[in-house]
Image (tube, rainbow, N blue to C red):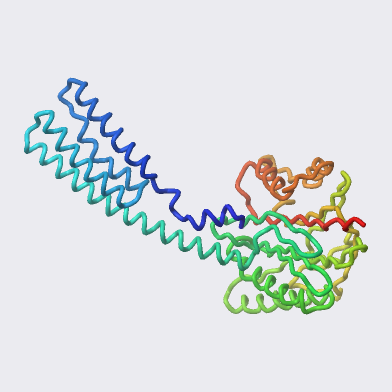
Amino acid sequence: MTEDALRTERRGGEGRRLRAPVFFVGLILVSAVIVALDLTSGTAVRLFPLLIFLPAIISGLGAVWQTAVASVWVVVVEVAAGAYLHGAWDDIALAAGFAALFGVVSVIGCRFRVRREEEVHRLRSAAAALQRQIVRPLPLRTADVLVDGLYQPVEEDTMVGGDMYEVAPSRNGTRVLIADVQGKGLPAIGTALAVLGSFREAAYREETLTGVVAAMENSVIRQNFFASHTGEPERLVTALVIDIPHEAGDPAVQAVNCGHIAPYLIQHGDVWQADLGEPDVPLGVAALTDETRRITRFAFPRGATMLLCTDGVTEARDPRGAFYPLQERLREWAPSPPTALAAVLGADLRHFTRTAPRDDIAILTLRRPEPPLG
């Protein structure tokens, strides 16, 4: 979650309250216009009784005290306008009574609305805090790499989805995970959390990437075992784990690809997809094959940008059914990659599909710092 989003969460419903100057000016102006029309119209039909609806409008936009002030104000205006226009006191009392009744109902409705907003704000604040613990805000920086990106669950209000990423410093370098759980939205979160927790622990503990992947595999197997006993569907997980070493002079990095999209690299105006060979099977189904996980190496020079993404990007379609041309877009931007490449890519993706995302989206951009001069 970005800092702007966090500030919005902390503010809660404050943005939906009428500012005091706007409230008072609007209240007086509306009342003055309606009363002035009554005075100048010269007809027997009076408009000022319509002011009884003003507190109801305020109750949907403002605070409780603003609704109460508007209610009292309307009663005063009703009485003053009726007396000035020489209305019958019985009619004035009746109008004031209706105005007071509508005002009380408006205050009660406003209080109910505010309580619901406060409840929603507390729930969203808790969800935001949970998200910050589960999916760490970007950008992230370690001694080996600067990571930025975009994370967008398909169910936006959940703030967490089936796509996951993590960056974990280890004793030998930095290990990066991007994963995509089968399914989307809330039902996939349990498996995603299991994979994320096992990666965080194993990334520091295990010496090899295959050891890290084995720990993640076991977590998916355990999650599927529990799911089979609760009636939930078993799930598989595509994942890509990359190990970026500390050595400043070594451009090569290691990767284990468990059925995920291979990374793209951008450097000197050129774009290419890393050759990781045939991908291994996804996490959760390794027992169905005799093949062992393989570590592949590919060049990630300093100054280059690596892009990782989930299939929410590559399988997005426009209204005519065409897939999003990721590599073509990257070639267009390669001569001068945007500083916030992931954000630009996300905006272009929304423009391409012309609709809300139909799958979780995770995009990471990795950049190794340039070696110091001299």
Q: Residue furthest front?
A: 374
Q: Left or right: where does residue 332 sit relative to residue 140? A: right
Q: Nearer the viewer, residue 11 or 189?
A: 11
Residue 319 position (above or below residue 197): above
Please provide percent x and percent y for residue 237: 72, 67
Where 12 falls versus 268 (above or below)? below
Q: Quadrant of the C terminus?
A: bottom right
Task: Locate the N terminus by quadrant.
Answer: bottom right
222 sits to left or right of 114: right
Q: Is residue 130 left or right of residue 210?
A: left
Position of residue 296 relative to residue 322, above or below, is below
Count of picture labels = 0
Residue 277 is situated, as x and y percent measured from the top left of the image, at 89, 61
- Tell which of 23 and 336 is nearer to you: 23
Please state the horizontal and vertical placement of residue 184, each as a whole percent of the image.
63, 60
Residue 145 x, y percent position in the rendering: 79, 61
Residue 115: quarter of image: bottom left
Q: Residue at x 55, y 60 (%)?
A: 158
Kindly identify the residue that appears in the image at 88 percent across and 61 percent down: 276
Q: Which quadrant of the structure image shows residue 319?
A: top right
Q: Please name the residue shown 60% across and 64% down the image.
A: 132
Residue drawn at x 69%, y 41% as measured from the top left: 352
Q: Give the vertical position of 65 relative to 80 (above or below).
A: below
Residue nearest the observer in this picture, 328 or 137: 137
